[in-house]
Amino acid sequence: MSKALLTQEEAVSKLLAYVFSGAIGSSEGKSVGYALVEATPTAFSWFACLEDDDGPPMPIDRYLIKIDRLSGDISAPKHVVLPEVELAEAIFAATGQRLASSARFTDGSLSISYKATVQERPGIAYVVQLRHHGRVASMDALMALISRTIDPSILPVPTVYPIPGEMDRQKATGMGRQITRFIPGVVARSVYSGMPHEEKLVFVRKIALAFQACWRIQLPEQRLIGELIADATADGRVVFKTGPDRHHGLGGPFSSVREYLRAYIRSSLAALEKQEGVEEYKEQFLSRIKDFINGGMHNIPVVVEDVPIVAMHSDMGPHNIIVSSETHTEIRAVIDWEFVACAPYASLHRIFEMFFRGPGLNMFGPEYDRADELRKAFWGAIPDWERWNQSEAARTFLEWFKFALFLKPEWRPKDLSPDEKRDFWRENIRIVENILNKYSTASVERAS
């Protein structure tokens, strides 16, 4: 009898045990970060690193680790770097300029970054990033289009310098290289929570206009839901197409909003079934949720199909916004366009909430002071979308979308007080019970 291949979940367990064993350095006081690079019938390839969650942002050493699916053997970790010779060649190919200096730079969650200067223009700097997730050629085409067609005071993006032949290179190696102009400033996440309320009001009005500018990008008439891919043509135009969702691994592309919601909900259920450390929640809800998903999702109202499907940066939170070091309400750039989608605008609900509430271990942190005023300022700055947000279509969509977001709770620390334990999953329970009570088959039968 042939041996069963490792599943992705089993490979993750092996990967974590291997990294925590000290394979890439001492893991004491650190967490393991990992991302799937490639899955084939014979192996899983991962980027893995050790992260100091309490330390300041700094470059992280990432390693490529392969796990054989049949034998379970783990390859020796391979340090992922961009050699200076290759970096110099890439900059010269993209800009015609010669490298003067380079150094590791603060990384994104899915990239390895370098800051470089050139001999010809010592007053400017570039950021060169190794990316395994984003389609670099698509990112370059979209960012260049935004730079040409949208007021940079509304939606600023770093200037991109495409590397000739990079699309083919990324297909061959699995890693893409992107070069952008370095934007001085600070990440909004590091300063936003400490802004006075009046400054937050100014900021959310500005970022609302940035969202709106993105949503106004012209898309193909048939608006499928999935990853938005931009192709630059020889005559300088940008042509869009929609591929399967890669951000959440939902599949697709989807031809209807209800189909998209069902896929999102099923994906969240699969994540809940695998989630560890939430046994108490599972005992109370897992069986009910499974029964409902298997029999009740035909009840998603058709009105959700009216929600506008738009172009979006799916991760445009404070962590991907650069602001001025001196004037924190001045947005200098929106960065990291790896996750770009064609999707219902209201699917950005979790991102919107980052501007109205602080971070929390349960992914639903406490609201900022006078959060209702922040929400009013945000939507008031884009009144057409405020009207959509108040529509039956958007409210119904959010009801089901929040069910997908909250049906899987986060791991709950064991050292919480009884009151803190009750509060930790309070929003998960409220949203799940609301859907189960309102839309379950049994409820519909009782109502009829």
Image (cartoon, rainbow, N blue to C red):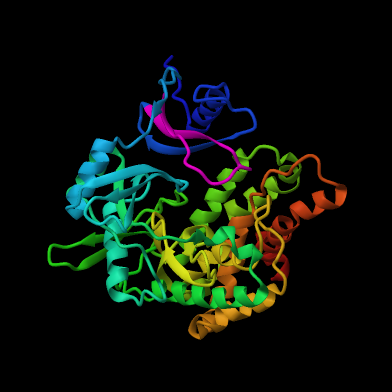
Image point (42%, 16%), residue name: 2
The vertical placement of 426 against 35, above or below, is below
Image point (49%, 37%), residue name: 34
| 280 sits left or right of 47 in the view | right
The vertical placement of 109 against 24, above or below, is below
Q: On the image, which quarter does residue 296 sit in?
A: bottom right
Q: Quadrant of the N terminus?
A: top left
Q: On the image, which quarter does residue 435 sit in?
A: bottom right
> Is residue 16 located in the magenta-colored stretch of the structure?
no
Does any portion of residue 366 appear in the rendered image? yes
| 10 sits left or right of 343 in the view | right
Which residue sits furthest left? 235
Give how far across and how far down residue 39 sits, in percent. 38, 35
Give how far across and how far down residue 320 sits, in percent. 48, 59
The residue lying toward the viewer, choosing from 109 and 103, is 103
Image point (35%, 35%), residue name: 81
* Highlighted magenta segment, given as a residue range: 43-68
Image point (39%, 45%), residue name: 113
The vertical placement of 128 against 440, above or below, is above
Give how far across and how far down residue 245 sits, in percent. 40, 54
Give how far across and how far down residue 356 sits, in percent. 64, 68
Does any portion of residue 344 appear in the rendered image? no
